[in-house]
Image (cartoon, helix red, strand yellow):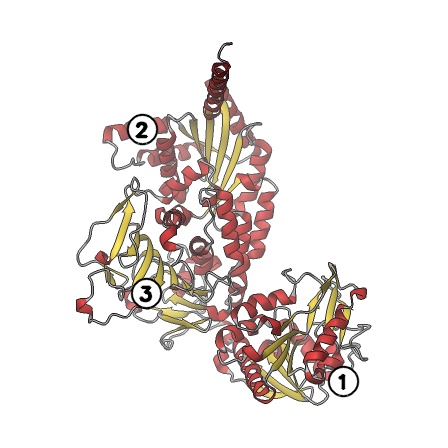
Amino acid sequence: MKHPGVREMLTATVCVALLGCLQAQELHGHVSIILLGATGDLARKYLWQGLFQLYLDEAGKGHSFRFHGTALTSTEQGQEIIAKVLESLSCPSDTAPARCAELRTWFQQLSEYRRLKTPEDYLALSRDIEARVQHEGRREAGRIFYFSVPPFAYADIARNINSSCRPGQGAWLRVVFEKPFGRDHQSAQQLATELGSFFREEEMYRVDHYLGKQVVAQILPFRDQNRKALDGLWNRHHVERVEVVMKETVDAEGRTSFYEEYGVIRDVLQNHLTEILTLVAMELPRNVSSPEAVLQHKLQAFQALRGLQKSSAVLGQYQAYSQQVRRELQKPDSVHSLTPTFAGILVHIDNLRWEGVPFILVSGKALDERVSYVRLLLKNQAYCAQSEKHWAAERSQCLPRQIVFYIGHGELGSPAVLVSRNLFRPSLPSASWREVEDRPGLRLFGRPLSDFYAYSPVREQDAYSILMSRIFHHRKDSFVTTENLLASWVFWTPLLESLAHEVPRLYPGGAENGPVLDFEFGDNRLSFSQPPPEQVVPGPGSAPTPSDFQVLTAQYRHSPLISAWPEELIARLAGDIEATAVRAVQRFGKFHLALSGGSSPVALFQQLATGHYGFPWAHTHLWLVDERCVPLWDPESNFQGLQAHLLQHVRVPHYNVHPMPVQRHQRLCAEEDRGAQAYAEEISALVTNSSFDLVLLGMGTDGHTASLFPQSPAGLDGEQLVVLTESPSRPFQRMSLSLPLINRARKVAVLVMGRMKREIAMLVSRVGHEPKKWPISGVLPDSGQLVWYMDYEAFLG
């Protein structure tokens, strides 16, 4: 050809046309949506409407649809229920009534009801779908199964879908689950494992309907579109606190059987409020449109959550609740439920962005208003020389600075994004969000509406309509993955276990609550602002509570014993360590502290980090009593626990921190690398007479201490200061200070906590000096002091 470029252009055009044809062919597929539990309450209220909206959004764009309502209800009764539901479906407000009736008729013609119970029923459904696809001359694009059924039914239905109702090759499968997804980490793991045996992770969509709320769905796009304004504000230097709130006026009447099993924390905080918290707290990915990036950053936010203590929570219960439980569950008059219907939780995030910023999560029933919101209250460091009447209206830097994601209801009555006018004018998509007109007299969070730039959706959509669309379009970031679900339960389960027998504060309900549920926070704990009312809920067996005992002092193995409830015990030990540190620095100019690892000292580390500002950290040297033979960054590492719970929160000079050298020459605890000898030499060089000012130890259920185990061949006697040992549990290899070195200390504190330690505590109280059998019995400082710190559960059982 005279013009070779023309030939190339023609070839490219043909290729593009062929690709377009292929893509069009790909789009023109049939989608079957199977709603399981189609006659139930959730389906009738929300899911059929969501499916109708999906049909309105997607009809005419290439796919054909069929909607299969299924349940255990008989065919005749089910058809009658579904017919009524379909008649009540509504269209967007801008749709003409005649057009809406026409669309509804088309949707009704595409919808059917069938009973779905046996494997044969599922096989018949699959064959009917295949026959319809063949009759229409289309290919099958995929199937969506929406589980609007109780979780106990999941396994049987999943088994039947997997064996008898999966689509053929080339078509996708999406299965959608409603909460609850377990009631603790173990049950959630069990359910996830069971479902994972039938479906792949990319096929599963766990619904948290709050992620479909328009304002919640706007949090990440808002942060992305306003990056320039927010980059300098969205951090601990400028945010005073974050509130995530969902208040309800209704009570639990008619649902007490569910509520008795789950309570307010499992029902609302573990899922809805935690998901919202992660959207606010997570690092913003470069591309917020990437589901994979969003989910990965959410997981990182979960992993940065600081563990919760009992003191992180306040609990309440409306006064009529126990009576409702007795009536609905036919319980005797003596039954008083301990299930909380109100909870306030203090959450901290251990990373550079949010260190020290309190996140307050609140939810409850029978409260004074129905409202949900996320509120970021920013620090105000301005001073205005003139009186308030002369401040620049709405824009004065002395006015409160707030960013509010108003999820719904309340005084405003509709979803909105609010930004104080003294911050910046936010950017939101003009096609879908519009500025709210001022409403004189309306005040939100202590300020008139005119103080805010306020935007609300042009067209309000319910959460399920949005989520149906995201399921169809494979937007996994609007759903809860298995990994994120289990991370959430890892965070919440220890708190739930610690609160299982806690007596909630009673409140009358509604406007009569007054200030009875008001609480204050500080020093990593929450407490009600007012003393408890006279009326209380009796606990099981009238078990003693912390207020029944003061801190007890006694003798244990001929040494001082301090015993108390866990919180008081930790506070006492932390205070004693600080006092010892101050005295040592006054006398010697420095304080050498050797700390054990494991779970028991975590609460102590957190107490020292957040409640002891007079601690002489600048003059403190931190040493490890023992270490697992894993890299220092490994979660199993004692040093990693020390770093996470203490070091990153206090100002210890880095050259005063002395981790054990378990990894040398890219090997772990190799004898020939002389790591133990190197640590001993470092101690000898820096610690006078190798005598630590204070050594903190624990006691294992087998009587071990540090990493000195019964029958250890080294470390129980002899001249070695630091030894390599073997543990009976993984990781097996350890490095530990020896008993002779521990006994050189000026003071040794042994912390023993938990009911599991009761048996060994009793046994050790009776044995003599037998370190080969019970290494802890060999702890007796040569010229120093030994003090035992034991909580009531370990001491009294």
- Note whether 672 is above or below 161 in the view shown: below
User: Would you name the residue on which mark 1 appears?
Assistant: 768
Q: Nearer the viewer, residue 41 or 413?
A: 413
User: Would you name the residue on which mark 2 appears?
Assistant: 103
- Which residue type does callout 1 highlight? Gly
- Which residue type does callout 2 highlight? Leu
Q: Secondary structure at mark 2?
A: helix
The CA distance from mark 2 to mark 1 is 86 Å
| Within-10-Å neighbours for mark 3: few <14, some 14–19, many 20+ | some
User: Would you name the residue on which mark 3 appears?
Assistant: 509
* The image quarter in which residue 704 lies: bottom right
Residue 110 percent coordinates (x, y): 39, 27
**Residue 406 tag number:** none
* The image quarter in which residue 249 lies: bottom left
- Name which of mark 2 and mark 1 comes first in the sequence: 2
| Within-10-Å neighbours for mark 2: few <14, some 14–19, many 20+ | some
Residue 399 percent coordinates (x, y): 26, 65
| Within-10-Å neighbours for mark 1: few <14, some 14–19, many 20+ | few
- Name which of mark 1 and mark 3 comes first in the sequence: 3
The CA distance from mark 3 to mark 2 is 44 Å
Residue 119 percent coordinates (x, y): 57, 33
As drawn, which residue projects farthest toward the front?
A: 2
- Which residue type does callout 3 highlight? Gly
Q: How many numbered tags mark residues here?
A: 3
- Note whether 24 is above or below 402 in the view shown: above
